[in-house]
Image: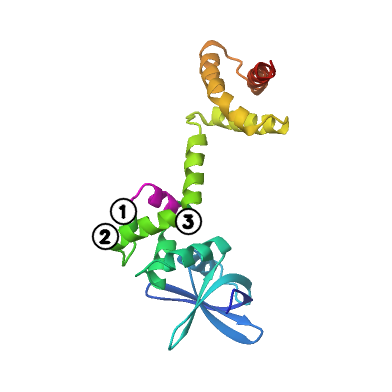
Amino acid sequence: MISWINGDLVDIWQTNQKFFVLLNCQGLGYQIQILESFFLKLKTNQKFNKNITLWIKHIKKEDSDLLFGFTSKDQKNFFIEILSIRGVGSQISMGILNKFSISEIINAIKTQNKKLICSVPGVGQKMSDRLILELKSKFKSEILIEEEKSKDKLEIKDPEINKMMEDLQLTLQSLNYKNKEIKTILPIIIQEVDLLGKNENNLSFEKLLKLAMHYLDEDSSNITR
């Protein structure tokens, strides 16, 4: 069973909506179906004899051996998970990954966006229902992580303030404050930013850092009392 392959690029081509590379690996030529995004990247920079490494899913059939190549292990594993769903073949699995990134698929599963899933060629209503249902159980942890990321995002329209808040988080982390504590006081700091922005012209990073440390140290002293 082939798990990954490293070889020199000999040729690339497209057949309908399938994309292929031919790799020379120690004198043997391997025909591998790849994702469209990687194909387009190779097409714009056609340097043959270029060394390429791909993660491989090897599918054995009665009359053929099929190789599917991915630039990351995550893509390969995601492909395998989609492929394990009843009624979903290799081309639909590749079609899903051709059209969407892994995070976009997980978000579609989380929000039960059937219209998005149905936009993949070959996927109908019944299959989209099955995909969402089964992938939701397979990727519970990933969906929870995406939800936590959404919760952690701060809605700040001003790009300068947004950058300042990001720098503030990093600085507080470097000063050994806990992430949980930092996240608790950030909404308070944002409110303070609104007030400072309206009443003062000298809003600065140093002022925000001092304010954040004041709140954090105050919380710590309340806990130890």
Instruction: Name the amino acid type tagged 2.
Output: Gln
Front position in the image: 94 or 57: 57
Callout 2–callout 3 Cβ contact below 8 Å: no
Residue 58: % across, % down: 52, 77
Q: Secondary structure at mark 3?
A: helix
As for residue 183 lying within the magenta part, the answer is: no
Residue receiving disc 3: 102
Q: CA distance from mark 1 to mark 2?
A: 7 Å
Crowdedness of circle 2 by 10 Å Cα count: few (<14), some, many (20+)?
A: few
Observer-side mark, 2 or 3, equals 2
Residue 178 in percent (x, y) is at 66, 31
Toward the right, the furthest residue is 175
Q: Residues within 10 Å of mark 3 (few under 14, many from 20)?
A: some
Q: Is residue 111 magenta?
A: yes
Q: Amino acid at mark 1?
A: Lys
Q: Which residue is mark 2?
A: 125
Instruction: Tell me the CA gap for discs 1 and 3.
Output: 16 Å
The disc at residue 114 is: 1
Q: Which residues are magenta?
A: 104-115
Name the element at disc 2.
Answer: helix
